[in-house]
Image (cartoon, grey):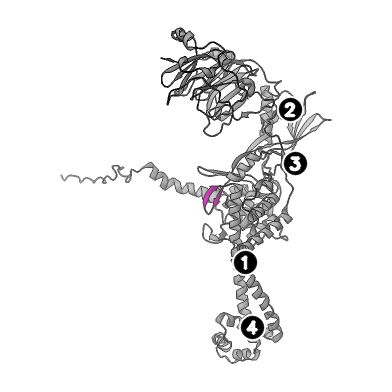
């Protein structure tokens, strides 16, 4: 019997294969990600999520251009059903109709998401300030382009921007819109891409245009003098922080604090909130207030309801008898989204590259973009006028002998020879001859030709002016300025978001309603804080900490105890125990640098609890100096949350100690020396960042590295006390080498 022939196995490649299903290739995961994930990531960044310098994402631009091509910008054109627009847009945007419709909703006047809506709408489009108010289906609503879109599409047919084929190569679409004003900063835009995001707030149209004009005239222009601050469609009051605004204008990143607008109806004993921060919704505010009422943190409110209707937004808050409405609102601003922060991140695509820019740089880039648009438009018009002049010059030659032109045409036997014969007869080129040949017989008369060639001188003058514009950047900028001034004149609106000024004063917190009860406070070496009630502590097991972390200090206090946190950047952050939630030992607790918004790379050094600001803070530095600062120096009449220059920065800090009474302190140097002294010998300093006095004289290259309160473990040094430690009251500055001992 013949042996069965075995099927050979596929050869191994890269040390791996799967029988019967093909070869598996081993490769580095970085290569796989680069090959498969990077194209997706770049597509999201460049073609979907981030706005470009004209102020639009691709989805916005495709929708608006479709409406423009359908004639929805003409004044005589009626609104079209939204469903029709959505269907037409799918020729450019190959996504689902729901995604396109949601894009349209945000651009409409009815949604109130934009300061200057691009779509004039009819029907229910929901509201940007409401989470639960849904928009109607596309078959019920109607839209057309708002008049301000004239500024977006002005001269788009004059090759002012590049056009590319759509996804199936059946039509052309613009890569940008030639907006005549900086729309990128006039309307808010939010986008989340891969590994990056964009959050551009809106600014008042008039202020942005005036700022752009000023920057074109003077690149060092003070932006804050013309651009007062963001302007949100939801209104409200913005906290005017000049330093933060300058940071946003220069870097493109920062945070803006916005609070709601309200009025008090005394007859109804009711607070009416009519404007809220742009970053929140009516439902989020009501839910938070209801939650606070359930927790017992707010007791002054008897009822809250949403009274938003066709007249606009309104949240009604009924008060209990005897409630001070202003004090209640201060508490609500602190505890609810009635006051909220808008985080700015001006990440914009410029020539296909994402870049975070400040207002100054954005307007500079927009000006360069607009200059290119004006150049291309001028060149387009120049070309058309030169072509027209070229044709009229042929008419001028024919005027000299009309009969000759007629004779040449009449005597030519073949139609194809008419143009060549005219070229020979009058010395004109083919284009001119073709133009002459196409003139109707009734127009071959002296009157018609004279009327047409009257424009020759005007055309020559216009051509000269256009060539002059193309060669002079100042004249191009003058055109842009004129267009911006015209936009201000036509579309200017008063500011919706006003300002409130408060310097560095934080809102007063109503403490009467804060419950007071015993608590245990714990702080770890890496900056985690726990507030645990005695009952919970007794029932708890071992403290949960990060690996390598340990409890550096613990205190018995009350819920109303004030807390001072010292950072390693010479700053003090003030808070209250009541600002932290009760915790369990089995939880990690609150990370202080994140909770109190420490600066970048700023860590925690120490925490001091106090209720009366009695006692002293001792600061020990590597150079052997020590400063004794009364805790009263950190007490402020206003509820400031951040104190700069909390201690000296002249030498690295070794230790912070809080002392209610004087005691013995043991210092240790890196060279093995020690010094025992009593803190009564150091006089207190009233200045927080005082360098203090030289307590320990250090050898060359030695530094202070250990500080501790002297206790029972110091018995071995007692025999040196009479020799090495001066009598109480002797000035610390006189302590020298004779007062130190070698261990």
**Which tag, 4 or 2, sits closer to the chain's start?**
2
The residue range painted magenta reads 347-356
Read off the residue under disc 3. 312
Q: Quadrant of the C terminus?
A: top left
Foreground pick, 247 / 492: 247
Please give the label number shown on residue 219.
Answer: none
**Camera-nearest label, 3 or 4:** 4
- CA distance separating discs 2 and 1: 62 Å
**Camera-nearest label, 1 or 4:** 1
What is the secondary structure assignment of the residue under circle 3?
Answer: loop
Query: Measured from the top left, where is residue 638 in percent x and y?
Result: 69, 27
Q: Residues within 10 Å of mark 3 (few under 14, many from 20)?
A: few
Query: Magenta-highlighted stretch: main secondary structure?
Result: strand
Query: Measured from the top left, where is residue 497 in percent x and y?
Result: 71, 42
Q: Decide: is 172 above or below 560.
A: below
**Which tag, 1 or 4, sits closer to the chain's start?**
4
Please give the label number shown on residue 328.
Answer: 2
Q: Is residue 99 visible?
A: yes
- CA distance separating discs 1 and 4: 29 Å
Q: Decide: is 69 above or below 34.
A: below
Please give the label number shown on residue 395.
Answer: 4
Q: Quadrant of the N terminus?
A: top left
Is residue 341 on the magenta stretch? no
Q: Decide: is 378 above or below 263.
A: below
Read off the residue under disc 1. 469
What is the secondary structure assignment of the residue under circle 4?
Answer: helix
- CA distance separating discs 3 and 4: 65 Å
């Amino acid at each position: 019997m013949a042996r069965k022939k075995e099927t050979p196995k596929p050869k191994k490649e890269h040390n791996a294969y799967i029988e019967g299903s093909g070869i598996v290739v081993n490769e580095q995961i970085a290569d796989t990600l680069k090959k498969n994930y990077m194209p997706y990531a770049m597509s999201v960044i460049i073609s979907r999520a981030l706005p470009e310098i004209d102020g639009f994402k691709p989805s916005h631009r495709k929708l608006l251009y479709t409406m423009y091509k359908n004639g929805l910008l003409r004044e005589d054109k009626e609104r079209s059903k939204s469903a029709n627009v959505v269907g037409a847009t799918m020729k450019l945007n190959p996504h689902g109709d729901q995604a396109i419709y949601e894009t349209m909703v945000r651009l409409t006047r009815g949604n109130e998401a934009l300061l200057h809506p691009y779509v004039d709408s009819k029907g229910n489009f929901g509201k940007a300030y409401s989470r639960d108010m849904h928009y109607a289906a596309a078959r019920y609503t109607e839209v057309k382009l708002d008049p301000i879109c004239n500024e977006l599409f002005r001269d788009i047919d004059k090759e002012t921007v590049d056009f590319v084929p759509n996804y199936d190569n059946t039509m052309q679409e613009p890569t940008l819109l030639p907006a005549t004003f900086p729309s990128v900063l006039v309307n808010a835009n939010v986008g989340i891409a891969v590994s990056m995001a964009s959050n551009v707030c809106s600014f008042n149209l008039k202020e942005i245009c005036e700022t752009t004009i000023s920057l074109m005239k003077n690149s060092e222009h003070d932006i804050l003098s013309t651009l007062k601050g963001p302007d949100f469609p939801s209104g409200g009051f913005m906290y005017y922080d000049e330093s933060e605004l300058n940071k946003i204008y220069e870097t493109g990143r920062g945070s803006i604090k916005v609070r709601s607008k309200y009025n008090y109806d005394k007859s109804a004993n009711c607070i009416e909130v009519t404007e809220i921060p742009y970053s929140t919704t009516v439902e989020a505010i009501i839910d938070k207030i209801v939650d606070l009422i359930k927790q017992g943190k707010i007791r002054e409110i008897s009822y809250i309801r949403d009274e938003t209707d066709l007249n606009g937004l309104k949240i009604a808050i009924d008060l209990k008898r005897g409630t001070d409405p202003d004090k209640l609102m201060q508490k609500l601003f602190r505890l609810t989204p009635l006051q909220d922060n808008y985080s700015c991140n001006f990440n914009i695509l410029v020539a296909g590259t994402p870049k975070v820019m400040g207002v100054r740089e954005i307007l500079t880039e927009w000006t360069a973009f607009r200059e290119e648009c004006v150049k291309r438009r001028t060149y387009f018009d120049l070309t058309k006028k030169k072509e027209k002049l070229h044709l009229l010059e042929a008419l001028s030659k024919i005027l000299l002998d009309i009969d000759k032109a007629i004779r040449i045409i009449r005597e030519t036997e073949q139609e194809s020879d008419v143009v060549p014969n005219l070229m020979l007869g009058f010395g004109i080129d083919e284009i001119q001859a073709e133009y002459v040949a196409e003139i109707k017989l009734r127009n071959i008369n002296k009157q018609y030709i004279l009327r047409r060639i009257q424009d020759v001188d005007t055309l020559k003058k216009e051509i000269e002016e256009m060539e002059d514009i193309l060669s002079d950047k100042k004249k191009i900028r003058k055109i842009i300025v004129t267009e911006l001034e015209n936009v201000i004149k036509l579309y200017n609106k008063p500011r919706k978001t006003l300002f409130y000024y408060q310097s560095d004063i934080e809102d007063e917190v109503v403490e009467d309603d804060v419950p007071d009860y015993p608590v245990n406070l714990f702080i770890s070496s890496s900056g985690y804080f726990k507030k645990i009630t005695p009952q919970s502590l007794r029932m708890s097991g071992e403290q949960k900490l990060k690996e390598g972390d340990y409890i550096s200090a613990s205190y018995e206090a009350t819920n109303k105890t004030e807390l001072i946190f010292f950072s390693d950047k010479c700053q003090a952050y003030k808070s209250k125990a009541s600002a932290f939630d009760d915790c369990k030992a089995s939880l990690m607790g609150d990370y202080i640098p994140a909770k109190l918004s420490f600066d970048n790379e700023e860590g925690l050094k120490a925490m001091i609890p106090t209720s009366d600001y009695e006692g002293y803070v001792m600061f020990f530095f590597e150079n052997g100096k020590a400063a004794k600062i009364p805790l009263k120096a950190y007490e402020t009449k206003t509820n400031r949350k951040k104190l700069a220059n909390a201690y000296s920065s002249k030498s690295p800090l070794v230790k912070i100690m809080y002392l209610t009474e004087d005691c013995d302190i043991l210092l240790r140097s890196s060279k093995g020396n020690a010094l025992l002294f009593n803190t009564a010998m150091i006089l207190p300093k009233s200045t927080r960042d005082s360098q203090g006095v030289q307590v320990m004289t250090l050898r060359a290259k030695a530094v202070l590295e250990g500080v501790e309160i002297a206790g029972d473990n110091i018995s071995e040094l007692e025999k040196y006390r009479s020799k090495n430690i001066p009598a109480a009251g002797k000035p610390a500055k006189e302590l020298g080498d004779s007062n130190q001992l070698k261990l």
